[in-house]
Image: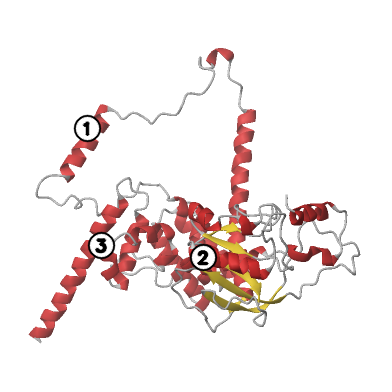
Amino acid sequence: MNHYAKALAELQLQPDHELKQIGDQWQTPKPLAWGLFHHFAPTLGPVVLDMFADDCNALVPNYYDAADNALTQELAGDLRRLGGAAYGNPPYSRPCVDGDGNHITGMEPILNFCREQRAQGAKIMLLIKAATSETWWPEDADFIQFISGRIGFEVPSWYVPRDPKKDKPSSSGFASAVVIFDASWQGERRPEARLRRDDLITTGQIILDMIHRQAVALNEEASQAIARSVNAEPAMQEDLPAVATPAEWEPPVATDNQTNEAAAQELALLEPGEDKHADRIDPVATIGAHHPDYSEPDLYLVRYIDEVAELSDADQNALRSYLKGWFDEGESPSEICYRLTLAAANLKAGKQVHDGFVLDGRTPTLPHWQRHPAVKAVIYQIDDADILTPAKTSELAGWVIDNLTTSFDLVELATAKAADLLRANEDQLLLSLGNGEAA
């Protein structure tokens, strides 16, 4: 263990502390952090690793602590393995090194490390002081945006003030900025508009509340299952299976009739002269099944946090109630997303929640489909999707989200669907041109 990590471990074990001893251990407020994660997810991807953390304050399951020393790690390789980006609220203390001469702290060494890892493909988001006059200020970062409103960083969970008055932490905070290192960054690099601290916190708190509710529900289900198991009448000895250890799981064996029917269906799809996609472009999702991204009503809210966050608490609760009803009634995912965005807009405008829900002949579409990773992953593999109109792409996305649980090759089916939509575009264009010539 390096001397920095050892000193920190000893500090944590002390019965009380002076405020100045917190040093590098001020923590990012979780709602603010999750607000940032959500805001930058469309361009940066998911945050999967916390660079400067410990088991008391890590914002995500994967993290480097002081003993790991982030500046000695293969960050780019770890991010490739985990499939996402890193976040860091860096230690600002003066540079110090371990016994091997490796830097542990200091803004200049940390930023140089980020530059090196960027060159290897790492995507890194840092929340830093808006200290543009400092020599270490990273003007070469791929993205910099300032935050309006000072951030009140939090004391670590182990902190016990020695003097309740003298060592009481201040919540004044300091001006901050988001800095991103990403060699593949495609967005705006120096936006003039500032991120609003309060908006980030509101969005992050909504996400954390949903996670908490889901965790509570899962714990309740687990407790009920344990209670049922404990209260169940124990099996008689003669009823126990002859094999003491459980056998390995094996997939169920289909009956001859099921096998023959499946084979006949597949052969019918491959008959010469017929389009093998003809009968498979219709909705083919497994009845009653939910994709993991949409297995609970609140998971829909995550995709439309921006719209929901603008509502009052009362309207948010009303929207959640309607959402649960649509989910329980078995509405399709695309319909739920459509209703969710429209209902949020209606509530914000003071209209009836259901205003505009029923539109004759409305084709299912998916609002803001780029916010849905499972849908986006399919569409980005389809060449024809690049030349569809935005309206047709939204229609394709609506079809994809409704068929995420299909047992067939979804990319293959979606490619055929995109080709159909493209042909419909071309037919409509020819019809319009024909009408123009006739006139």
Q: Which residue: 37% across, 30% down?
A: 252
Q: Quadrant of residue 423?
A: bottom left
Q: Tell me the mark number nearer the camera, choosing from 3 and 1.
A: 3
Measured in 3D between alpha carbons, the distance from the residue under mark 2 to the one under mark 1, in whole angstroms, is 55 Å
Q: Nearer the viewer, residue 413 or 327?
A: 413
Give the mark nearer the N terminus: 3 vs 2.
Answer: 2
| Number of residues whose C-alpha sits closer than 10 Å to that of mark 3, classed few (under 14), some (14–19) or many (20 or more) | many
- Image position, residue 144 (x, y; %): 56, 76
Outermost residue, front direction? 100
Q: Nearer the viewer, residue 374 or 253?
A: 374
Q: Amino acid at mark 3?
A: Ala
Residue 187 - label: none
| Number of residues whose C-alpha sits closer than 10 Å to that of mark 1, classed few (under 14), some (14–19) or many (20 or more) | few
**Residue that mark 3 sits on:** 418
Q: Is residue 357 above or below residue 273?
A: below
Circle 2 sits in a helix, a strand or a loop, which is it?
helix
